[in-house]
Amino acid sequence: MPLVSMGPMLRHARANGYAIAAYNMIDYNSARAIVDAAVAKAAPVIVQVSVKTVRHWGYAPIAGWLRMLADEAPVPVALHLDHCTDLDVLRRCIEAGWTSVMFDGSALPFEKNLEMSLQAYAMTQRAGVGLEAEIGAIGGVEDDKVVDEDASRLADFDECVRFVGEMPDLAVFAPAIGTAHGFYKGEPNIAYDLLERITAALPVPIALHGGTGLSEEQFRRCIGYGCGKVNISTMHKRLFIEGFTRLKAEKPTLEEPLPFIAAQHNAMAEDVAASIDLFGSAGRAAELSDV
Ligand code: 13P
């Protein structure tokens, strides 16, 4: 089916107590692994792309790969732009065929973040695509985005209410709740009380950033409180590399490239499939036929 916008499927996920896996693709093979796992699990899925990855491959190739993969898949696939601070990049992604984008103004003072998020909101509303926006500051490293531990900051509840109130059709909201990008160095300290307060006050689906390294229990609790989108990037990158290196270690004389591509695909797809099972989205595609 054609690429879909993530907003309606995330509202379905939040209303039904499950979450949709949002994996950061690296190249065509990694995008294919994400979509293949979703097809195998009859699950909706979000393929998201960092700005650095867009700059590496270009807008049209990524949009073309995803249109082709989605067209052949009998499950809903959304193409989303992850953390972007530049409204011009947002515009170019929308023009190329992305079905949603994230504006990340979390490094800005609240009023400036709100002002620029509203510009992104107006742009996405005009184009009929979804918007994700963030407040607070999620710590850790995600491609170009580096937020030191002392600069990470939980979202302020009153600001969350005001921010989302100004954007009633926000596809997904990303308040910083204590998770971080990259591998966790210690035990993540998730502010469940803040998350619960936000979801009790606001019907918008919540994005859980920093999915790599969270425990099954942490995922279940966050999804139970209304996180409808779970982002995973670092683990996907690791498996992208390990898919190759494990096979090379096993068969050092192998010179044929295609088995390496297949090993890489399978390593990534297995992880995506396991996440889909854990997040409760397996078998949900059929319920989303009209979104
Ligand atoms: P991880 O890299 O920790 O999996 O986080 C992914 C993410 O939140 C992308 O925005």
Image (cartoon, grey):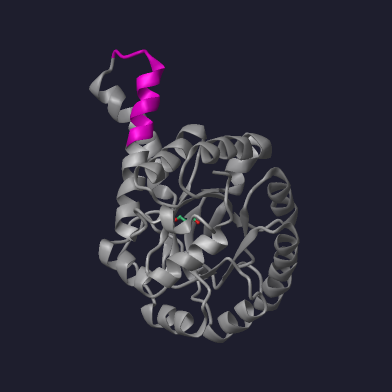
Q: What residue appears at the point 72 percent right and 70 percent down from the top-left corner? A: 118
User: On the picture, is 220 further left or further right than 106?
Assistant: left
Residue 99 percent location from the top left of the image: 62, 52
Q: Is residue 273 above or below residue 64?
A: below
Work out which quarter of the rendered image holds the C terminus and state it.
Answer: bottom right
Q: Quadrant of residue 19?
A: bottom left
Q: Is residue 3 above or below residue 279?
A: above
Q: Quadrant of ligand 1?
A: bottom left
User: On the picture, is 232 further left or further right than 147?
Assistant: left
| Front-most of residues 169 and 262 | 169
> Looking at the image, how many numbered discs can be counted on the residues?
0
Residue 39 percent location from the top left of the image: 40, 43
Q: Is residue 278 visible?
A: yes
User: On the picture, is 222 further left or further right than 32?
Assistant: left
Is 175 colored magenta in this rendering? no
Q: Is residue 270 above or below residue 187?
A: above
| Front-most of residues 260 and 61 | 61
Please identify the residue farthest to the left as the structure is shown: 250
Q: Is residue 189 visible?
A: no
Q: What residue appears at the point 51 percent right and 78 percent down from the top-left corner? A: 203
Q: Give the overall secondary structure of the magenta segment.
A: helix
Q: What residue appears at the point 67 percent right and 79 percent down from the top-left corner? A: 166
User: On the picture, is 129 further left or further right than 7?
Assistant: right
Is 257 colored magenta in this rendering? yes
Q: What residue appears at the point 28 percent right and 29 percent down from the top-left corner? A: 246
Q: Is residue 204 above or below residue 61?
A: below
Work out which quarter of the rendered image holds the N terminus and state it.
Answer: top right
| Front-most of residues 12 and 290 | 290
Residue 17 percent location from the top left of the image: 37, 69
Q: Quadrant of residue 82?
A: bottom right
Residue 197 percent location from the top left of the image: 44, 84
For the magenta stretch, what is the residue range?
A: 253-266
